[in-house]
Image: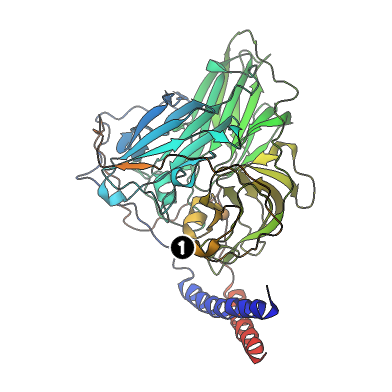
Amino acid sequence: MSVVTLRARIRDVLLPLGVALGLAGAVWLWGAGSGDRVVPVTPVGAGTAAPSPTPTPPPGPFGTPLSIPPVITSADASISMEEACVQILPGPCTNLWTYDGIFPGPTIRRPTGQATSVTFTNNLPVAAGEMTVHHHGNHSSPENDGQPHHHLIPAGQSLTYSYEHMENGGPERGATQWYHDHRMDVTGRNVWNGLAGMYILDDPADAATLPSGAFEVPLIVMDRQFDANNQIPYTFSSNGVTGTTQLVNGVYQPFLEVGDRKYRFRILDASNARVYDLSLSNGSSFTQVGTESGLLPAPVNRTQMLISPSERLDVVIDFAGLLGQTLYLRDERSGINLVEIRVTQDLLDDSTVPTTLRSLPDLGEPIVTRTFTFSRVFGKWVINNKSFNPDRVDAFPVLGSTEKWILQTSTLDGGALHAIHIHDVDQQCLSRNGAPCPAYEVNKEAWLMQPGDVLEIKLKFSDHLGAYMFHCHFLEHEDDGMMSQFEVLGPTPSPAATGTPTATPAGTASPSPAPTPTPEPTLSATQTPAGTVVPATLTPTAAPVSLPNTGGASYPQATVGIALALAVSALAAGVAASVVLARR
Ligand SMILES: [Cu+2]
């Protein structure tokens, strides 16, 4: 880039940024304390909720068995998005937006390397708007990735997503994945209302001796805030929407009976904005065998494990020697017991956890470095000071190349946590805060970030050309604008079509395999019969509700003085820089 171009670019950035910051600051100051943008849950259907005719007597704490979502194994599955009134708490059932009428949705379970198509039909009320389903963790083509603003599913229509489950010339690594709504601006609302389910990719290359079958249990952990009528009205708060009621597989205070042997638990944090710190009440350790990107190179023993929205922990717990005892899966952050585990059966254990599990794929050496800063600018969550714009692409990696991405979080946004999720490909950790990465996070696609964290990762873009998202998975941060997109280009970049690259690829990309052709998703107007849906109405949000924020991001409003000073200095800097540059 020439000096003139550089100056022009600096001027182009600084002046608008200064003005924007000044204006945003003024608007923010004016609006401070008035609450966040409110996206009410759209009232749908007719009449009122359909609560259970006979309220169920309260089962008492940990009186309800843990339910396991049904499993779909078909290569050609169909799932209906529909309203349902689901019994969660004693008393009235809770109106939800569901996959197939259940909450969480059915678990899809497929062998890796085998093509799979899933047809989602939007049987939700028209007022709910268009839907999109992100297969989280999968190496999908862009068209099948569940884009927030393209390839949407209008009410009454179906979309068939095609998943090859292939990556870089071979089957994808086995992994605990999931699927959830990803619609621009309203992902938080849609997931809160119930649109999430697990997706497991089985891999014959993974250790077969790990506990399996009845001894492998999904644990989908999430929080909700229930009102007096057992409904969960959603009120957007850019701080993150959290609730005081903790659910596991959609059950409040469940119990699980196990035998005195090893079990494998696939844990997913499907909360909008809550971080858990998991432990076992008897002080035992978890043996973590995998992350959201499949098995680790070797098992890691941990007594406490942080998990943030969209992260997965694949762990083995050994209940040997505990026959007759009761213990709890706990959240140390809230002090709440999540699941009561009763060791009631004397069983033989034929499972083992191998001392080595799965070596990491060789991603090669990075040829490009990009830095992304996740922060809050005058009340707006941003990446590199930019809010999400579907018409802007912020990085253009080249197919077949490996890049180093430096992810960093600000200490100036009130101590907020973030969970950075990058679509398309897995990422390997190079360093965290200048130190070697913990052994349990060498290969992932969702990264919990504490304030001021600096994370170096590398990733290799294989198989698919086109645009993908990366964003914070605190869903309200994402909906507020903390999302961006990169577009994978062919070896000869021609970025003119979709925006301006902010980083110029350095070096030459190594020859790469041709993109894998994947069927385009097909939209169909044929509406699937709705089946046996309990008529349901989501309660409209009459007034903004102040939700507790114990587990989510915490953002105390900055002082007016600091904000005003920042706004004025930013404006001054922008003007000054522009004047200086204009004189040259
Ligand atoms: Cu965030």
Residue 179 in the image, given as x and y percentages of width and height: 46, 38
Residue 275 in the image, given as x and y percentages of width and height: 58, 44
On screen, residue 480 above or below 208 = below
Q: Secondary structure at mark 1?
A: loop
Picture residue at 49% right of the left edge, 34% below the top? 164
On screen, residue 458 above or below 569 = above
On screen, residue 314 above or below 46 = above
| Farthest-out residue, bottom | 583
- In the foreground, 337 or 354: 354
Residue 382 in the image, given as x and y percentages of width and height: 56, 63
Say what amino acid the circle numbered 1 marks: Asp
Q: Number of labelled discs?
A: 1
**How was the colour assigned to the protein in this rendering?**
rainbow
Picture residue at 34% right of the left edge, 51% below the top? 41
On screen, residue 487 above or below 512 = below
> 137 left or right of 161?
right
- Quadrant of the drawing holding the C terminus: bottom right
- In the foreground, 547 or 348: 348
- Quadrant of the drawing holding the N terminus: bottom right
Cβ at disc 1 under 8 Å from ligand 1: no
Picture residue at 61% right of the left edge, 76% below the top? 9
| Farthest-out residue, left | 47
Residue 77: quarter of image: top left
- In the foreground, 239 or 386: 386
Query: On the rendering, which quadrant does ligand 1 occupy?
Result: bottom right
- In the foreground, 268 or 199: 199
Residue 119: quarter of image: top left
Q: Is residue 420 visible?
A: yes
Circle 1 residue: 391
> 337 left or right of 145?
right
